[in-house]
Amino acid sequence: MSGYPEYMQESLRLVEKTRPERIGKAFPFMKTEEKQKILKDWHPDFKEGTKRMLKIGPSKGQLMPNEVVDILESHPLIGPGDIDLSDIAYDVDVLIIGAGGAGMSAALLAQESGLDIDRILMVQKLRLGDANSKMSQGGIQAADGVDDSPTRHYLDIMGGGRFTNNPDLVEILVKDGPNVIKWHESLGVMYDKNPDGAMKVESGGGTSRKRMHSCKDYTGLEITRVLLDEFLNREIPYLEFTPVAELITDEMGQVAGAVLWDMDSDEYLVARAKSTVLATGGFGRLHIQGYATTNHYGSTADGVVLAYHVGASLRDLDSTQFHPTGAAFPEQIVGQLCTEALRGRGSQPVNKHGELFVHPLETRDVESSAYIRECYERDNGIVTPTGMRGVWLDTPLIDIIHGPGTAEREFSAMNRMFGKFNIDIRKEPMLVFPTLHYQNGGVEINTRCESNIPGLFAAGEVCGGIHGKNRLMGNSQLDLYVFGRRVGVFTAERAKKARVGKLTLNHIDRYERWLAEAGIKTDRRAPLLLPEYRGKKTLEHQLKLL
Amino acid sequence: MKLSYYPGCTLKTTAKSFDGSTIASARALGIELVELPRWNCCGTVHSLAKDDVMHYLAPIRNLIRVEEMNSQGLVDEKRAVTQCAMCYNTLKRANAAANDDTEKMKKIRDVMDEEPKYSGGVEVTHFLEVLRGLGWSKISDRVVKPLKGLKVAPYYGCLLLRPRGFGIDDPDNPMVMESLLETLGAEVVDIPFKSKCCGAYHTVHMKEVVADLSHRILTQASDGGSDLVATACPLCEFNLGSRQKEMKSCFRGFKQIPVVYYTQLMTLAFGLGEEASAFGLNDPDPRPLLKERGLH
Amino acid sequence: MGMDESGMITIYVMGKKHRVPADLTIMKAMEYAGHQFRRGAGCRGGFCGACSTIYRKKGSYKLQGALACQKMVEDEMYIAQIPFSPAEKKTYNVDELKADANTFLEYYPEIARCLCCNTCTKACPQDIKVMDYVQAALRGDIQEAAKLSFDCLSCGLCAVRCPAEIVPYNIGQLARRLYSKYVMGPTEHVLKRASEVEEGRFDDEISGLKSLDKAELQKLYEARDMKV
């Protein structure tokens, strides 16, 4: 019983027919020039008319997707007159905005660094633990293998990022990798291991060694739930369903806390803090170029907007990561992530004729471009009943190569996701197409996670400079914990000496002036906080693509 | 011969020596005890309220597992063998209720609609019944080191013998453990309190009750000349054994005496080695005494 | 009512009737009907457990559990969301715990109340054998409890339905941490590499790479040996 409609069956038969000859077949990696060309021709980042230059602020002149510029060239949600800054509800040393992997790590390390728990406050827009961190499937990179080294990891990252990464940040990322895994294990994270007790590791796009550590295909879920359990054990104060409407500054030009908004009571609360950490994640729910996304409900780039309102510098927002294998069928799961680990374990991207048309593990930017080209220039994709195009990801290869039971054991989440729609990925391929996945750029930070505004720190997906123009699989997971831990340590340190001055929201007036001076007339307001899916808009977001 | 084995929670945690010595001595007699897959806690202590359907789910689910095992050819009979007296009592009485009360069984079936229907055909037996069924001569054949000179007081406790119709032997004058011990070559010390309560669950919040009841049993055993007491229930083993600290402090002149599981004595007589016997887990430690008798 | 030619069906959200397209998930159907989620939506992909939902189908007395983002609507479905379960999570220091049954009994003594009714398993949207892992924990089989509970999202539906008031996902979480930390233990080569980094073994190599210009670095990158 196939999970696919009748008209797709012929192509499926071709996929089955060509499978034996494709097993273990090596498709050559593209040469540099070929990669550059395919990106220019087919990667959504390079599509005409999808970006424009930001007209205001310290990063004026940078090219960014229209959707990002829209929220930056928007009015703040509140005016200075709306808030009574003398009525302080929370007064802490560290305010952490966002409770994903980076946010929770920051809270734990801030506490471990000696801060009293009452001097820490973590605020979360939605449910505690809800974040892109939790959704990561395939793995986290760290160079702890016997035949591997942080040096190799460094080279892989720089190359993958097209050499635009900040080398100091990459150095920290690779060196701290093994320690992060050690930390996770001490907390009780269940990593997959080989019978001899060594870490079971796999390959990812652009990696020269197998160093993807996994917890089946629920890696993010496993790590974040252990961290959440530990976070709750330490009784660090937190607020759920409390997004930030605007940061607060002081007369010395520091960031001094935030205006919180209680989603249940609709009231504003003032939180004063010596250091404020943005751990707000990415921008998938902006649906850049109308793409579906792998991201969670709250990924509306709030942190980037908040940071920009106070004058922080941004970088590399012209670069958006599309994950090559987002589900393309059935329609109910379009855009959802199908882990790169599927390719790591042998699945191949195959066109409607059953042909392998690209190496399965090019870096994500190149891989995505290849799938888009295959569907649009070469017209070799499958068209779904809703007009979406996709290529096959031949997953039955996994059990054939590694033995029956492998897919069931290692890809619980994938089996379940497709199984609900009668597609048994052990017997039939998946249909995939690139999906909006990761914010490569963001708030510029230094090695201490400091932005250029004193008192404002950032960690995780909201930052730019670590991954350059293209992130490799498993490095975002690593980034969260490396920089999340560091920001906890550094903000705890800073608490000893920092002094907060008189609170102000004057930066809002300044932002309004920037908008006025640039002649921007709009009724848009930001941060967005929640995407709009009500009514017929729901249907729009399900279908449109190019 | 393969039989379904229901260990119960206690044998997997605080009574591991009972579990290990049971499996080892069974194997020595040609019986493979195959552990029930996906077994759950029996519910412990049979619910006496007639309208309490909920408490039957746990034991009956285990009986369904036994039927499954048998139909899958994993075991030779539709029989569950258990060792823990509490589990034995609970499973057996739940089984009887399932067979006698169709109204109750219908409700249970409706709630457990994700399981196959229980036909009622499983036999719940205690390991002592299996041994008795084998025949003492078969057991005697397996003895390589008769427990010569060892004086043992068998102790049954309550749940193995009551209520009538469910017990494995006459509650006033049980004989099965006595016969077994004699077959192993030991000298049996018959004590009047061999089926009197040890204090059971009072061990949790009223240790002094346990200390009182149990010390009388042990004193009879010592006075009768016993070297040690053999028991067939993990709670009794705990009360008679580990609570001797409390007995020492409550009762002047109390003489400590080792308490072991009868299956441990079987492994000793069968010469199965220290790992099977696991005497190190008993409190007080019986090994000094066994060494003295030349048996260890 | 049934599905009409336009492909619409009837659902009831917290008792309110709506006509929605038949091919939507519960989450998208609720949004189609005009509901903006604050609680009850998270990853939207079946990984976070935020959208726990209870529903009945017409004519059935059974109450069923699902994740709103993964479950398709059906005609005459009665839907309610349970975005929060008031369960108590005990605090503990995992460094001080033992990996045995007593740990569970100490922190979550209600686990001994398990009736083995299997209601938790029936409520679980991830098809986990919930009762089985709770029972495994009860008898100290940490490995089994960890393995069986692995796909748990802590959505809370089991806790909300359990008649013995057990919170199974707390048990699973504790079992998994104990299993990894004490039964599996830390990985040798990870500890070794972490020490090596701390001792500065890779400092010079990486500084060397940092000092190269883009062209040189690119050459090294293209020439690197791939062992995958």
Image: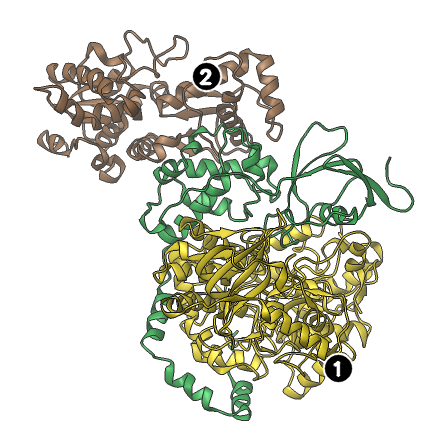
Chain colours: A yellow, B brown, C green
Q: Quadrant of residue A482?
A: bottom left
Disc 1 marks a residue whose amino acid type is Asp
Q: Is residue B150 visible?
A: no
Q: Position of residue C199 (x, y in %)?
A: 31, 76
Which is nearer the eye, B266 or A31? A31
- Chain assignment, label 2: B
Can you identify the residue that label 1 sits on?
Answer: A41
Q: Total of numbered circles in the picture?
A: 2
* x and y percentages locating residue B116 in the rendered image: 60, 28
> Where in the figure is residue B57, as x and y percent of width and height?
52, 24
Q: Residue at x 33, y 19 (%)?
A: B135
Task: Judge the density around disc 1: few (<14), some (14-19), many (≥20) Cα neighbours within 10 Å.
Answer: some
Placement of the N terminus of chain B among the 4 image quadrants: top left
Report whether residue A158 is seen: yes
The one nearer the camera, A385 or A317, is: A317
- Which secondary structure, mark 2? loop
Question: What residue is at 11 percent from the left and 20 percent from the top?
Answer: B254
* Front residue of A200 and A438: A438
Disc 2 residue crowd, few under 14, some 14–19, many 20+, Cα 10 Å: some
Circle 2 residue: B47
B117 to the left or right of B94: right
Residue A379 relative to residue C110: left or right: right
